[in-house]
Amino acid sequence: MIVLVGPTGVGKSEAALALAAEMPSEIVAVDSMQVYRRMDIGTGKPPPEVRRGVPHHGIDLAEPEEEFDAVRYAEAVGPVIEQIRLRGRRPILTAGCGLYLRVLLRGICEAPGKDPEVRGKLLERAAAEGSPALHAHLREVDPEAGRRIHPNDLRRVVRALEVFEVTGRPMTRWHQETQPGFSGKGDCRIIGLACDREKLYEKIQARIDGWLAAGWVEEARALAGRDLSMTAREALGYRELFGHFEGRTDWASTRALIHRNTRRYAKRQLSWFRHEPGVEWIPAGRDLRSLAA
């Protein structure tokens, strides 16, 4: 199994397609937002004609009203990877979401499920005091999670606090007691695609502007009136567009926010993958045909 990791916009999908042209294979997207139907342009899903040419998996697994997490993803995709192998083909994973990849390869923790009452109280507190207050509390009860989770990542802050409130044990301790991974069996080579930061930012800007020109605003507007899950509503780029629709930002500010927040997200992705064991880093755009041998 070949796993391509790296920040958004670095060229993981293009590299996977180039590899797929060299060997019998199928592509698996490891992305926390491509799992949602009707969120196509702003999540960078490969277009239908590409998916018809090379089988893709891990895409369109849920409605945007549904909460979706790494465990559900691994439960859905792990068996698919085994089926690809049984067909005599090689799975090629394109991974931008480090948490989903970690659970898929290395296992899940048996932390409790969602508690609507506790979660509701935490969200009320976030609305009243702001997400930094919740993050400060997280740093007190689970310092490791506080360092790992960005203060503005309200969904993950709430989840970590929810687990602590329900069980009295930090999320970090639960993560240390994982069950075997769904797809960690067999050979697995993890390739990190590296890119000069300024060049990466240029690629991100061009990508976002291309999505906006391709109808991303209209796609987001069609979702804005739906009862979206917290996960979908907080999707990068969509949340900024929703804020624009609600009159909180003008268009110039909205576009600038999407660019800025995407660059910050790319930095967090790089930081995550730099700390993952077993990643071989190579320059983005390098010929990967040797991997098909």
Image: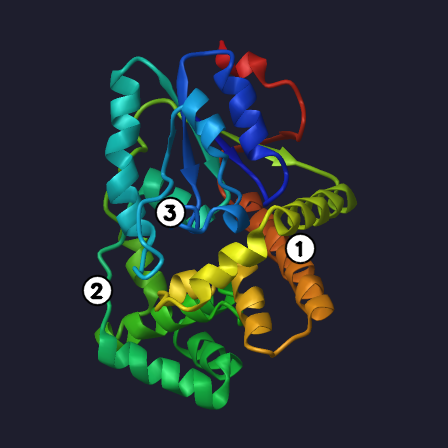
Give how far apart the Cα atoms at labels 1 and 3 are: 22 Å
Say which residue appears at 37% left-offset and 65% top-offset.
228
Above or below, 186 against 178 in this view is above
CB atoms of marks 2 and 1 within 8 Å: no
Circle 1 or circle 3, nearest the eye: 3
Asked if residue 181 can be seen in this view, the reply is no
Q: Quadrant of residue 86?
A: top left
**200 relative to 4 in the view: left or right:** right
Residue corresponding to mark 2: 112
Residue corresponding to mark 1: 263
Residue corresponding to mark 3: 35
Give how far apart the Cα atoms at labels 3 and 2 are: 22 Å
In the image shown, does 188 or 229 lie closer to the viewer? Answer: 229
Give how far apart the Cα atoms at labels 2 and 1 are: 33 Å
In the image shown, does 5 or 87 lie closer to the viewer? Answer: 87
Mark 3 and mark 2 lie on one chain; the one further toward the N terminus is 3
Q: Few, some or many C-alpha atoms within 10 Å of disc 2 (few <14, some 14-19, many ≥20)?
A: few
Above or below, 83 against 212 in this view is above
Say which residue appears at 35% left-offset and 81% top-offset.
122
- Is disc 1 placed on a helix, strand or loop? helix
Mark 1 and mark 3 lie on one chain; the one further toward the N terminus is 3
Q: Amino acid at mark 2?
A: Pro
Measured as percent of width and height from the top left, residue 250 is found at 68, 73
Say which residue appears at 63% left-offset and 38% top-offset.
10
Which residue, as the protein is rendered here, is positioned at the far top?
293
In the image shown, does 182 or 77 lie closer to the viewer? Answer: 77
Mark 2 and mark 1 lie on one chain; the one further toward the N terminus is 2
